[in-house]
Image (cartoon, rainbow, N blue to C red):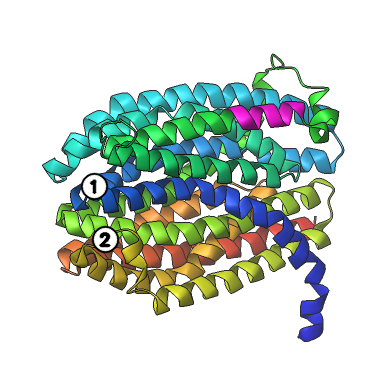
């Protein structure tokens, strides 16, 4: 057994080196919303914190559609780079930029004309809805710069350059936190903006990240072999379809999973503002560990995609197994931390003891679903690297919308278990997804080995 583990050492290390910056970069998206929750919870109160939860539930569904579409380029870049086709990588980038720009405009319209009307009909606390509307509108404006940033970020990560997006994300989050405190509290002559303040800070942060990432990719010597063949107007339907063939199913995978958690937030909101705020506290902590696992999954996509591109299936299997093992170790550690410090972690967000008590109970459940959450996202990453996205999309739909969310609603509302019952349902959905995606990976790799 020990000898077998040692044989995986180069794969552990290679995956870890690539995943580390991706983890921090992925974590940046969550840290923006976590910082918003912390600042609002401490400086504005429980109802504004519930408003942040409501807006995040609505906005995250729209945002992950965009991130999924943007992600479609990454496995394609990894595969073409594995074949040494730099010109094709450049053409994929130009098509991704235009596609992401159009998607950003359409998604803004979806939020502005759709969510702003729908939010009145979700059976939420009227005081929470009143606080939420201005924040949702401002936050929706940040979709366009986020999509352009993602086009260049996913291109760079597909080539294995992950540290630069990490650095940009870190500094972006620092800027976001500073501005959020200034705007929410009202400092340096600025009137207190409440919840809207975190919306403005996020918008400014994402515009700055877009500009810096664009200049980095276009000017860095690392990318010159690719950018020298880049033409912004080299747009064609064949490559757009190629990107969408992966990006659209990935977007739907994100929608089914994140949408289930957003639905859980809305169900919690029908129980009460305190329960919704408690859900927001616990889900933000769980989202942090998920994004770290998502970084390992992104590294798995790049490594398996590169191996798939040059038909090295032995190497592909090694990276797949090492990714599963790494995420299991990591998520076991975070589950232990949640279980040990569950009574203390909620104080990061709020001093409201009613919220802290419920959130502490939810973190025990979160500790349980950490393992399933980590293995399912790595399973998705491995399959994306191999270009297999349609069946995994169906699996995520079944796991979250046929099993997870309905069972959560049944236990939470009909059985009177409250928000804890909702979380038991989410855990069941994650377990289903994890098992079925691993089963799918075994089928796909067996097919290629015997082709």
Kindly identify the residue that appears in the image at 44 percent across and 57 percent down: 287
Q: Is residue 252 left or right of residue 319?
A: left
Name the mark on residue 388: none
Q: Position of residue 102 (x, y in %)?
A: 51, 21
Kindly identify the residue that appears in the image at 31 percent across and 34 percent down: 136
Q: 33 above or below 325?
A: above
Q: Are marks 1 and 2 in contact (CB under 8 Å)?
A: no
Q: Is residue 46 visible?
A: yes
Outermost residue, bottom side = 1
Secondary structure of residue under mark 1: loop
Q: Is residue 274 left or right of residue 53?
A: left
| Between 240 and 443, the one nearer to me in the picture | 240
Q: Position of residue 99 (x, y in %)?
A: 58, 24
Q: Residues in magenta? A: 211-219
Query: Number of marks in the image?
Result: 2
- Residue 268 quadrant: bottom left
Q: Is residue 147 left or right of residue 401?
A: right
Quadrant of the snapshot with the C terminus:
bottom right
Q: Along the polypeptide, which appears first: circle 1 or circle 2?
A: 1
Q: Position of residue 163 (x, y in %)?
A: 69, 47
Q: Which residue is mark 1?
A: 44
Outermost residue, front side = 188
Kindly identify the residue that appears in the image at 63 percent across and 44 percent down: 167
Q: Is residue 28 magenta?
A: no
Gap between marks 1 and 2, in whole Å?
Answer: 16 Å
Q: Residues within 10 Å of mark 1 (few under 14, many from 20)?
A: some
Q: 146 above or below 431?
A: above
| Between 32 and 79, the one nearer to me in the picture | 32
Q: Which residue is mark 2?
A: 278
Q: 286 above or below 113?
A: below
Dominant secondary structure of the residues highlighted in magenta in the image: helix
Quadrant of the snapshot with the N terminus:
bottom right
């Amino acid at each position: 057994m020990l000898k077998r583990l040692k044989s995986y050492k180069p794969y552990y290390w290679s995956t870890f080196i690539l995943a580390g910056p991706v983890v921090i970069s992925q974590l940046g998206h969550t840290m923006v919303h976590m910082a918003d929750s912390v600042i609002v919870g401490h400086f504005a109160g429980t109802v504004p914190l519930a408003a942040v939860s409501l807006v995040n539930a609505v906005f995250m569904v729209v945002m992950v559609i965009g991130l999924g579409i943007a992600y479609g380029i990454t496995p394609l870049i990894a595969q073409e780079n594995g074949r040494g086709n730099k010109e094709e990588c450049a053409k994929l980038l130009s098509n991704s930029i235009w596609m992401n720009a159009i998607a950003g405009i359409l998604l803004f319209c979806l939020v502005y004309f759709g969510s702003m009307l729908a939010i009145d009909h979700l059976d939420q606390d009227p005081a929470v809805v009143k606080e939420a509307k201005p924040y949702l509108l401002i936050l929706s404006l940040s979709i366009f710069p986020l999509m352009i940033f993602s086009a260049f970020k996913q291109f760079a990560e597909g080539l294995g350059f992950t540290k630069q997006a990490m650095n940009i994300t870190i500094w972006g989050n620092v800027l976001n936190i500073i501005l959020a405190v200034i705007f929410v509290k009202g400092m340096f002559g600025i009137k207190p903006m409440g919840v809207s303040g975190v919306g403005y800070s996020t918008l400014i942060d994402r515009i700055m990240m877009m500009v810096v990432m664009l200049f980095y990719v276009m000017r860095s010597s690392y990318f010159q072999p690719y950018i020298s063949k880049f033409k912004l107007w080299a747009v064609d339907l064949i490559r757009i379809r190629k990107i969408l063939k992966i990006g659209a199913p990935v977007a739907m995978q994100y929608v089914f999973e994140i949408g289930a958690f957003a639905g859980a937030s809305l169900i919690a909101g029908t129980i009460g503002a305190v329960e919704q705020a408690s859900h927001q506290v616990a889900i933000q902590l769980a989202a942090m560990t998920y994004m770290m696992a998502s970084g390992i999954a992104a590294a798995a996509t790049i490594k398996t995609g590169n191996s798939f591109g040059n038909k090295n299936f032995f190497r592909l299997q090694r990276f797949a197994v090492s990714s599963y093992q790494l995420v299991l170790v990591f998520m076991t550690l975070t589950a232990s931390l949640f279980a040990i410090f569950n009574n203390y972690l909620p104080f990061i967000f709020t001093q409201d003891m009613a919220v802290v008590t419920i959130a502490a109970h939810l973190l025990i459940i979160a500790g349980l679903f950490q393992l399933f959450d980590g293995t399912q996202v790595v399973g998705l990453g491995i399959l994306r690297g191999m270009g297999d996205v349609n069946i995994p999309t169906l699996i995520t739909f079944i796991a979250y919308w046929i099993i997870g969310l309905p069972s959560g609603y049944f236990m939470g509302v009909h059985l009177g278990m409250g928000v804890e019952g909702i979380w038991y349902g989410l855990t069941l959905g994650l377990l289903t997804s994890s098992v079925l995606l691993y089963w799918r990976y075994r089928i796909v790799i067996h097919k290629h080995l015997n082709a």
